Structures are given as C-alpha cells and as structure tokens.
Image: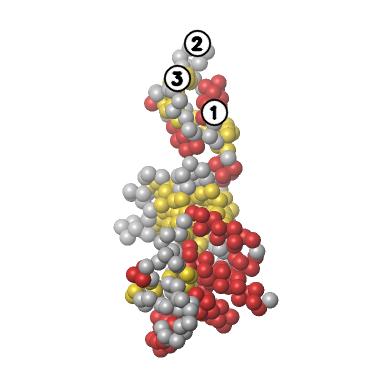
C-alpha cells in the first residue's frame, strides 16, 4: 500500500512538472486528464503536488540554510555516480525527466537562476513524497497558469479542485491555482463556471479590468469586443472593477446579469433568465424578446453558413424561440415564417435577411 502511494505521488510530481513545461501539448493535457480521472487517489495526489511544491518553494525562499542543504544534496557528485544521469527539468522542487532538454533549458524557478541539476529523477520525486508525508500545507509561491483554448467546438474541463468549466466556441482562458487562491483569466469568449466550495481559497475570474469572485456558485462570464457580461445562476458573486481610474464594487443575486463597458467601465445590472443565457451550454439557442441583431450574433457563433442582415431596419425586431445551435438554415426559415423577413441566398457561406413587404405583413 505504501509503495502504491509512493508511486502515485511520483506520477503526480511528473504530471505537475510536465503540465508546466513550455512544450506541453494538448495531447499531454488529455493524457493527464485521463490519468487524473482514472482513480480518486490521482486527483488527491496531484492536489498535494500543488501544495507541496508551493510550500517547499516558500521554505527555500525563506531559509537560506535549507536552500544550501538541498543544493549540497542535489549537487553531491557521488549521488548516482554509477548511472547515466538524464537531464532533470525542475519547477520549484517538483521535477521530471526531459531527455530532449539541453542544459541551457534547465531552470529552477525558486532561485530564479539557471543551473544543471545532475540527479536521478527518483531523488527529485522523493523530495515531493517526503515533504508530502510531512504535511506542509501553507505556501506563497504561485503555480504557472494552464491555458485552455477552443476554436470551433466547445469543451468542458474539470479543474483539480473539482470545479467544472464549460468553454464556449472561440474561448481562451488561463487557470492558476495556488494554496491561497484559485484564479482564472478569461482572454476572450464565454465560459460557464460550476465552482466547488472552498472557503479557504476564493475562486475569481478576471476579464478586462473586472474581477468576479465566488466561493461556491454557478455563474457565466463573457468577454466581447467592448463589454463584459456576468450572469449569476446560483449562489452569490462579487464583481470589482480593478481599474485605478474608476473602482467600484457590485454583488449579484441569482437571476441577475451585470453588463460592463470595457472602455468607460459603465455598468448596468438587470434581471435575466439564467437558463436562457446559458442555453448554449446545452446545445440550444433560446431567445425571449431578443433583438434580431443580437440573435444573429448568437446564431453565427456556431453556424458554418453565416446570417447577415441586409436591411439595418431589421436589427431591433424582437424575436423568441428555442433552436438547435449550428443549424442556421432551419433557424432563419423559422424566423421568416413569423417575421416580415425574406431570405436571400448568399451562396454556401452566407444567408441574407431583408425586409419583406406584402399585403399580409408590414
């Protein structure tokens, strides 16, 4: 049993380092998620790797005597002298083998200097295991962010704390967890967060200058060209504008949405149906008294054949309905049946809507 725990911690250390390597690929991340989800002990070991790496980093930074002792142990010429020593890429004190790494690529983030640590990987892993058993829980060192990005398809990710994030198409976010905080940065697109409760580590999402903070809740953040929208489905969130020129603080209740201008920081809070605002996460597009121009923007997120309003006067027509995301032809056919619209074939890539004038509709 002890050997099994030792091996799991070693695997967690290897994954912790691999995910923070510059050449970490999408295939690597997918393999990690498969390993993590294969057994509950894997997720627990990986969480411990986070805590231990940060805790040891703090210990080294605060006590030069410990740093000197570790350096002496790691640089001891007799250690592993009878084996061919592979390169070890170290992130804090959590290390992994990198056969392709050149000596100049080996980095030690705690000391902020470059050096070559010539030790077997088992020694590096044993540092994690030994300290993990010792139970160090507090630290200040921040982990490197993990970036997730989607193009034409959405994606659901499960974070190490048990939180779940659903990414819409065209979304990019970075996840950075430390022993004291859970920090997300949304660089573009839209994401729905189902946050695992952890009173000791606030969960925050930054978009432009606005930061949304929650402890255990379900909410959505969307970053557009000139605005940020935060929609609360469950729980409670606090929103702060962190721009020095115009700081303010807001709280949302379930069923409220805050729209913020990224240029002026002006904000508008209003009630909304969260099930409609998050319908994209279920593969649907629901509209209720929605401007046609706004509906077209939503339709085009998922459609191969885009919709364009050929008549600007159509923009403010209000529509409602529940549609399958991605099927723009079916959606415009349904709209044309109830609105004064005429469909113009724009070829394989475009559908054009113009106003229809006849004796029956105006």
Q: Earlier in the sequence, mark 3 or mark 1?
A: 1
Q: Which residue is mark 2?
A: 359
Q: Residue furthest left?
A: 245
Q: Which residue is mark 1?
A: 331
Point out the frontmost of discs 2 and 1.
Answer: 1
Q: Residue 346 is drawn in which quadrant?
A: top left
Quadrant placement of the N terminus: bottom right
Q: Residue furthest right?
A: 1
Residue at the (51%, 79%) spot, across then down = 123
Numbered label attached to residue 344: 3
Q: Earlier in the sequence, mark 2 or mark 1?
A: 1
3D distance between C-alphas at marks 2 and 1: 24 Å
Using a 10 Å C-alpha cutoff, classify the residue at mark 2 as few (fewer than 14 neighbours), some (14 to 19) or many (20 or more): few
- Describe residue 275's horizontal placement relative to residue 97 as left or right: right
3D distance between C-alphas at marks 3 and 1: 14 Å
Q: Secondary structure at mark 1?
A: helix
Residue 95 appears in the rendering: yes
């Amino acid at each position: 049993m002890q050997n099994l725990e030792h091996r799991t911690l070693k695997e967690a250390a290897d994954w912790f380092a691999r995910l923070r390597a510059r050449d970490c690929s999408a295939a690597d991340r997918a393999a990690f998620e498969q390993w993590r989800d294969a057994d509950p002990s894997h997720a627990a070991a990986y969480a411990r790797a986070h805590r231990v790496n940060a805790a040891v980093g703090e210990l080294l930074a605060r006590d030069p005597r410990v740093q000197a002792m570790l350096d002496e142990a790691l640089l001891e010429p007799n250690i592993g002298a009878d084996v061919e020593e592979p390169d070890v890429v170290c992130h804090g004190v959590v290390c992994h083998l990198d056969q392709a790494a050149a000596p100049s690529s080996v980095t030690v983030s705690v000391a902020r200097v470059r050096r070559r640590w010539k030790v077997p990987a088992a020694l590096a892993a044993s540092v994690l295991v030994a300290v993990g058993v010792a139970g160090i829980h507090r630290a200040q060192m921040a982990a490197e962010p993990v970036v997730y990005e989607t193009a034409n398809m959405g994606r659901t990710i499960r974070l190490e704390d048990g939180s779940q994030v659903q990414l819409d198409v065209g979304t990019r976010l970075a996840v950075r967890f430390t022993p004291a905080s859970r920090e997300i940065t949304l660089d573009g697109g839209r994401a729905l967060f189902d946050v695992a409760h952890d009173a000791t580590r606030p969960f925050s999402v930054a978009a432009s200058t606005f930061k949304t903070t929650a402890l255990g809740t379900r909410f959505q953040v969307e970053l557009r060209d000139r605005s940020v929208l935060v929609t609360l489905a469950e729980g409670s969130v606090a929103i702060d504008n962190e721009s020095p020129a115009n700081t303010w603080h807001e709280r949302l209740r379930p069923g409220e949405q805050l729209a913020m201008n990224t240029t002026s920081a002006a904000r508008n809070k209003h009630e909304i149906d969260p099930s409609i605002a998050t319908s994209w996460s279920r593969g649907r597009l629901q509209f209720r008294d929605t401007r046609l121009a706004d509906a077209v923007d939503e339709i085009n997120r998922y459609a191969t054949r885009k919709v364009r309003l050929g008549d600007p006067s159509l923009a403010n027509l209000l529509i409602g309905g529940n549609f399958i995301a991605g099927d723009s032809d079916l959606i415009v056919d349904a709209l044309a049946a109830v609105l004064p619209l005429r469909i113009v074939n724009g070829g394989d890539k475009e559908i054009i809507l113009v106003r229809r004038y006849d004796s029956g509709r105006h």
